[in-house]
Image (cartoon, rainbow, N blue to C red):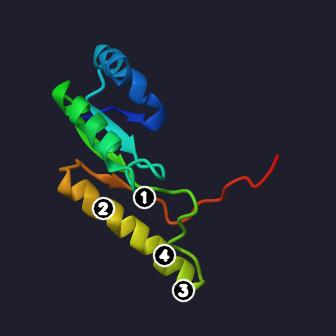
């Protein structure tokens, strides 16, 4: 059975109920909620609130682990170790909250300037 989800992040918080209503009408069945530092990493209450709202609205919830500046594929052991710790903490938090799944990236490249 194909299931389709919608990704939400901290900037969607003020209008989460509207977005979930539109997602439901479009046939979405779950929400992928992005941890985006500090949201969900150190500032957990707003993250948990969005997760509760999504569940109250009948959606399953998955988690997208932090990705900015997280590099678990780094050949530099201290960098890799730090990235692994961030991802492990996100997985533990997602598990504690009963997430459907967790998405992570082994590396990310951010534009430095434009």
Q: Nearer the viewer, mark 4 or mark 3?
A: 4
Who's the residue at 27% across and 51% down the image?
Answer: 101
Q: Earlier in the sequence, mark 1 or mark 2?
A: 2
Instruction: State the CA–CA distance, disc 2 to disc 4.
Output: 14 Å
Please tell me whether mark 4 sits on a helix, a strand or a loop.
helix
Q: Does residue 85 sit above or below 44 in this rendering?
A: below
Q: Earlier in the sequence, mark 2 or mark 4?
A: 4
How packed mark 1 is, by other alpha carbons closer than 10 Å (few <14, some 14-19, many 20 or more), is: some
Q: Is residue 9 visible?
A: no
Please tell me whether mark 3 sits on a helix, a strand or a loop.
helix
Q: Earlier in the sequence, mark 4 or mark 1?
A: 4
Q: Residue 8 in the image: x percent, y percent?
A: 41, 34
The residue wearing badge 3 is 77
The residue wearing badge 1 is 104
Q: Residue 56 in the image: x percent, y percent?
A: 17, 28
Q: Nearer the viewer, mark 4 or mark 1?
A: 4
The residue wearing badge 2 is 91
Instruction: State the CA–CA distance, disc 4 to disc 1.
Output: 14 Å
Dots 1, 2 in contact, CB < 8 A: yes
Instruction: State the CA–CA distance, disc 1 to disc 3.
Output: 19 Å
Q: Residue 28 in the image: x percent, y percent?
A: 30, 25
How packed mark 2 is, by other alpha carbons closer than 10 Å (few <14, some 14-19, many 20 or more), is: many
Q: Residue 109 in the image: x percent, y percent?
A: 65, 59
């Amino acid at each position: 059975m194909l299931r389709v989800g919608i990704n939400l992040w901290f900037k969607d918080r003020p209008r989460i109920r509207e977005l979930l209503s539109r997602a439901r009408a479009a046939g979405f069945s779950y929400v992928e909620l992005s941890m985006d530092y500090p949201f969900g990493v150190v500032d957990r209450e707003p993250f948990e609130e969005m997760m509760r709202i999504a569940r109250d609205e009948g959606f399953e919830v998955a988690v997208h682990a932090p990705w900015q500046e997280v590099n678990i594929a780094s050949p530099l052991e201290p960098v890799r170790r730090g990235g692994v710790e961030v991802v492990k903490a996100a997985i533990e938090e997602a598990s504690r909250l009963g997430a459907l799944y967790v998405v992570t990236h082994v590396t990310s490249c951010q534009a430095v300037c434009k």
